[in-house]
Image (tube, rainbow, N blue to C red):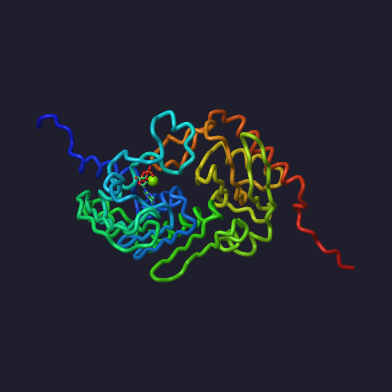
Amino acid sequence: MPNIHVLDQNTINKIAAGEVIERPASVVKELLENAIDAKATAVTVEIREGGISFIRVTDNGCGIEKDEIPLAFLRHSTSKIQSVEDLFTVSSLGFRGEALSSIAAVGQVELITKTSRSLTGNRYQIEGGQERGMEEIGAPDGTTFIVRNLFYNTPVRRKFLKTPMTEGAHVADLVEKIALSHPEISIRFIQNNQNKLHTSGNHNLKDIIYTVYGREITANLIPVSVTGEAFSVEGFIGKPVIARSNRNFENYYINGRYIKSNIINKAIEEAYKPFMMQHKYPFTMLHFKIEPEFLDVNVHPTKMELRFQNGENVFRMVRDTVAEALRHKELIPKVELVE
Ligand code: ADP
Ligand code: MG
């Protein structure tokens, strides 16, 4: 056996990237979340070949100062929390400082960024964890990330990618979910030079539901709106007529984050029980606001599964809110009586 030694940073980043960056959609997720955390009001996502050869995310957010650019690509470097105590009140989508270092470890990254305070922008390139230089460049306020040839230096990972069509579909799905979670941000998605989605950023969730899910769903929505101190919810639930045979349409967001939670699924389904056939699942598009101290977002790098401080309370609040909304609606389609 060789001697025990500490792995070099590049190797550590590559290994860490395995957890955070699984496929093009994970890159797009991290870059979009960064754009949102940077307070962008408009973001454009462009991919080619399912994102395997080319991903570009452009935002009009706060930008990164020149001397902080290399820092942003270091592992565990973040502007979003200072210490572990902050984790309990975190309201940004990111905070681990792992995304950029991971992406740069397994792709060829070009960054163009400018803050409103500086006169010119900067272009920075890094690939396979190796810096390729920085230069001043004219640019609008905001940030553009280009990621080329994902996993070009990890052939085994690259082999596990599916076809460009499948990877592209994962990206499209992800962009739609993020567009639905932030109706206040105008989000544009371009795939192989074609415009696939463009939300207006006019705060109207129903418009985006229409764009993504179409007329039938939009025509069968029940609005939900409850405002409380520690718990608020806004959004729509579907009438039972638009139920599906899987949970794909059970969407909900907590504090702007798309997540999965067994507790919330169960609560929603319990409320629907009297109206649903077995093995049918409702359409929901609910935006919850829950005080960050009731949540633990520090569960998994991709942060999809959320833990609650008091799961039973959350269960009850969600179930009762949905049940109440269902109670006030005529749920059975009217049949016209013809003489
Ligand atoms: P995290 O989002 O967890 O902080 P990242 O690796 O995703 O970690 O990003 C590192 C840092 O780079 C962020 O904390 C932020 O300061 C900066 N950053 C990344 N993307 C952007 C962006 N689009 N606009 C402005 N700053 C950004
Ligand atoms: Mg991030």
> Residue furthest toward the bottom?
193
State the residue at coordinates (59%, 38%).
266
Along the line of sight, which residue is nearer the eye, 256 or 112? 112
> Residue furthest toward the left?
2
Count the labels in the image. Answer: 0
Pick the quarter of the image with the N terminus: top left
Q: Which x, y percent locates residue 302?
A: 40, 43
- Picture quadrant where residue 72 is located: top left
State the residue at coordinates (35%, 53%).
23
Q: Which x, y percent locates residue 60?
A: 43, 58
State the residue at coordinates (69%, 37%).
320
Left of 45 or right of it: where is 151?
Answer: left
Pick the quarter of the image with the C terminus: bottom right
Q: Which x, y percent locates residue 334?
A: 79, 59
Q: Which x, y percent locates residue 99?
A: 34, 46
- Picture quadrant where residue 332 is located: bottom right
Left of 13 or right of it: where is 210?
Answer: right
Along the line of sight, which residue is nearer the eye, 336 or 204? 204
Left of 127 or right of it: where is 286?
Answer: right
State the residue at coordinates (40%, 55%).
116
Above or below for 317 versus 253: above
